[in-house]
Image (cartoon, coloured by chain):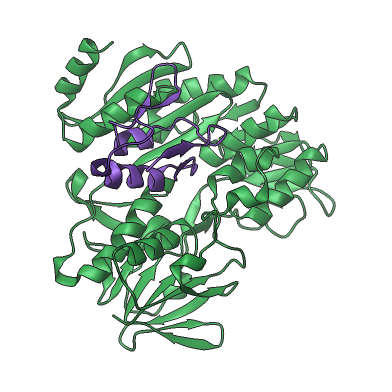
Amino acid sequence: MKRIVVVGASLAGVRAAEALRRDGYEGRVVLVGAEAHAPYDRPPLSKDYLAGTTARPALDLRKDGVADLDLDLHLGQAAHSLDVDAHTVGVGEETVEYDGLIIATGAHPRRIPGWDARPGVHTLRTVEDADALRTAIVGGARICVIGAGFIGAEVAATARGLGHQVTVLEALPQPMVRGVGPVIGAVLARLHRAHGVDLRLGVGVEAVVGDGRVEQVRLADGSAVECDLVLVAVGAVPTTDWLAGSAVTVADGVVCDAMLRAAPDVVAAGDVCRWPNPMFDDEMMRIEHWTNAAEQGTHAARTLLRGDEATPFSTVPFVWSDQYDVKIQSVGRFSGDDRMEVVHGTTDDDRFVALFARGDRLGGVLGFSQPRRVMQYRRMVADRASFADALAFAAENP
Amino acid sequence: MKIVVDFDKCKSNAVCMAAAPEVFEVRDDNFLYVLQEEPGEEQREQVEEAVRTCPTGAISLI
């Protein structure tokens, strides 16, 4: 391969580019990114960057820039089309040829139809979004967050830490209940309320109301929440519109094989990639976590370089969320319906470890401020430990 | 190689511990302890993985 094009200049794309060079690839590497910035990290955008305790330069993914990677940079231009047969991507007015292509275009916030065209309605994905949110927050805006997932929860926590009033509206009966179940969902609710968040559960939102700008959010029951700023944090959608009409399969992400191949000479990685994970019986999944973007970006690059020698990408998903003083970490693959046992600590506190079963197997682990234990159990999930063995380990290592 | 941790950036995710358990340990006090500040070459691959996979970029090698 003489020229590899990476479309997407955030974490997965950058890790892919790094892996290409680290594995000795000496051809051209073209990095295309829709954002005009040097690649930067997103997790701080809802946490310390939003709080103002981390400065802008500290967001950069590579402290010393990307010069040592010898990339051809096309930043501030989104790719708009792909021709798999011709081996070209359309970027702006250019047609860029590739021998190998890495799709890492990530995801973008899901929006509520009709809520966009009004000052004061925000989403959070980019550093510009975070800057706008911060300006509004420190200006004293009363904040209404729609959605109690990770982003909504972290923004609420950050805003409360700055002393601002926050209402969080969640449609489900507990925050993240589909993912963590009712017991831990209730712990999340308690955590928010203990820190003064006005958390409303099981509510439907009807409309954002105001004369020109936001004045209130009207709920399905007719009541209203007075606010100056609305953060829509109802999930993300993979960025795949640009692939419409191309030969890659798009179905809630770019559909890949176990080696992360989407088409001949095309691989995908990160939030945009849907692939069968051998770690969990080849279940098709698309993971929106930081660690996955990094690991998958690296693996996708290797798949391109290794050709027929490429290996499957098998991973135990891992995600963390810092809310107030609590470090929440989730490992593995499980849902709120799975059997759950608390093995260290108690859910009456904000410090515990919960194990989730997936049939007879240890499917996953959720820890609140227990990083050491969570990492031990991540290893056990990777080793396909049985749930019984995990419980026994917990009993022997209290 | 010498390991340097920026403890302002370290958030004790313990991903480093998963990558190089003989070098990095997050203990029950939730603080990261670097078990070997100058590990041997046989640890290089694991240590470099820890550097790369740290979610906050808190680890560097000098």
Figure check: A373 above or below A89: above
Q: Is residue A16 visible?
A: yes
Figure check: A260 above or below A188: below
Question: Residue, x 25% and y 13% (percent of image)?
Answer: A397
Left or right placement of residue B56 versus residue A26 in this view: right
The quadrant of the picture occupied by the C terminus of chain A is top left
Question: Residue, x 46% and y 72% (percent of image)?
Answer: A70
Left or right placement of residue A130 versus residue A236 in this view: right
Q: Is residue A252 visible?
A: no
- Say which of A364 and A217 sits in front: A364
Figure check: A171 above or below A246: above
Left or right placement of residue B53 versus residue A264 in this view: right
Q: Where's residue A31, x and y in %?
A: 47, 72
Q: Where's residue A17, x and y in %?
A: 40, 65
Q: Where's residue A351, x and y in %?
A: 44, 16
The quadrant of the picture occupied by the N terminus of chain A is bottom left
Q: Colour of chain A?
A: green
Question: Residue, x 51% and y 67% (percent of image)?
Answer: A67
Hey, which quadrant is residue A115 in on the image?
Answer: bottom right
Question: Residue, x 39% and y 68% (percent of image)?
Answer: A103
- Give the chain letter for purple: B
Hey, which quadrant is residue A344 in on the image?
Answer: top left
Q: Where's residue A24, x and y in %?
A: 29, 68
- Say which of A104 and A198 sits in front: A104
